[in-house]
Image: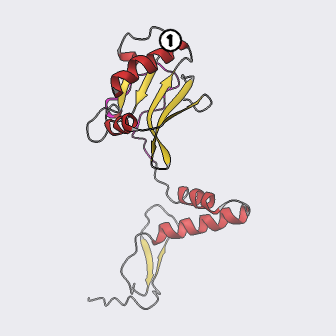
């Protein structure tokens, strides 16, 4: 049988099952589809209905939040994490896949856990060849540290920024388990001189 597909008309096809959504057989079909199948139609409908429900229950919720919650509810598929769990202390091994950038250049520029430079604590320096070159050639360099945003096990997250045009771009990030003078000594005098000069 040859089925002529007419995309411009509204589809009146209806498929009936026996009300058990476990892959039960089709019990009745009325009319035939007059269009090419749309595999995303069901997902769009789920997202649209979820968004309407979220918005009606939370009228003051910003649109981006509604969309984020609605799209999160769109699929029942379980998402499998590819990356390892976030460490809760500073004593962890950095997985091999996170040691370098996509082009093969080092991303972890220094890790005191792999050397004997620091006896009590840890410093990790993150960056790339490009950001180190930007930092080395900058006319102005700025630094910014955060105590409240540092990962578990570290006391400080510090970033060096290089001026690039009218703005400052982050170039090198440091994670430190202590905020003592010996730590800053290792950070500034030994490690940065080795990377930049």
Give the quarter of the figure containing the C terminus: top left
Whether 92 is among the magenta residues is yes
- Using residue 89 as the reference point, say whether residue 128 is left or right of it: left
Which residue is painted at 48% across and 66% down in the image? Answer: 43
The region drawn magenta spans 79-97
- Residue 153 against residue 181 in the figure, above or below: below
- Using residue 190 as the reference point, say whether residue 157 is left or right of it: right
The colour scheme used here is: secondary structure
Q: Main secondary structure of the magenta part?
A: loop
- Could you say where residue 121 lies in the image, as x and y percent from the top left? 49, 14
- Could you say where residue 113 lies in the image, as x and y percent from the top left? 40, 16
- Could you say where residue 166 lies in the image, as x and y percent from the top left? 49, 50
Quadrant in the picture for residue 27: bottom left
- Residue 12 against residue 92 in the figure, above or below: below
Count numbered badges in the picture. Answer: 1
71 or 23, nearer to the observer: 71
Secondary element type, mark 1 = helix
Quadrant in the picture for residue 99: top left
Residue under circle 1?
Answer: 182
79 or 155, nearer to the observer: 155
Which residue is painted at 45% across and 8% down in the image? Answer: 119
- Could you say where residue 169 lies in the image, as x and y percent from the top left? 46, 43
- Residue 5 against residue 90 in the figure, above or below: below
92 or 148, nearer to the observer: 148
- Residue 125 against residue 121 in the figure, above or below: below
Give the quarter of the figure containing the N terminus: bottom left
Which residue is painted at 72% across and 62% down in the image? Answer: 57
Quadrant in the picture for residue 152: top right
């Amino acid at each position: 049988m040859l089925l002529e597909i007419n995309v411009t008309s509204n589809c009146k096809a209806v498929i009936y099952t026996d009300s058990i959504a476990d892959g039960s057989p089709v019990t009745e079909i009325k009319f035939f589809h007059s269009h090419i199948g749309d595999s995303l139609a069901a997902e769009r409908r789920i997202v649209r209905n979820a968004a309407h429900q979220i918005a009606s229950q939370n009228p003051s919720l910003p649109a981006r939040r509604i969309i984020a919650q609605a799209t999160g509810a769109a699929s029942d598929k379980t998402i499998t994490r590819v990356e390892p769990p976030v460490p809760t202390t500073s004593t962890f091994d950095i997985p091999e896949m996170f040691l370098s950038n996509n082009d093969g250049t080092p991303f972890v520029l220094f890790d005191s856990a792999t050397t004997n430079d620091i006896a009590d604590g840890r410093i990790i320096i993150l960056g790339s060849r490009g950001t180190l070159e930007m930092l080395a050639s900058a006319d102005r360099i700025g630094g910014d540290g955060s105590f409240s945003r540092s990962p578990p096990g570290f006391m400080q997250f510090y970033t060096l920024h290089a001026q690039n045009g009218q703005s400052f771009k982050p170039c090198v990030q440091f994670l430190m388990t202590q905020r003592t003078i010996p730590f800053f000594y290792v950070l500034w005098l030994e490690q940065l001189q080795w990377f930049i000069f």
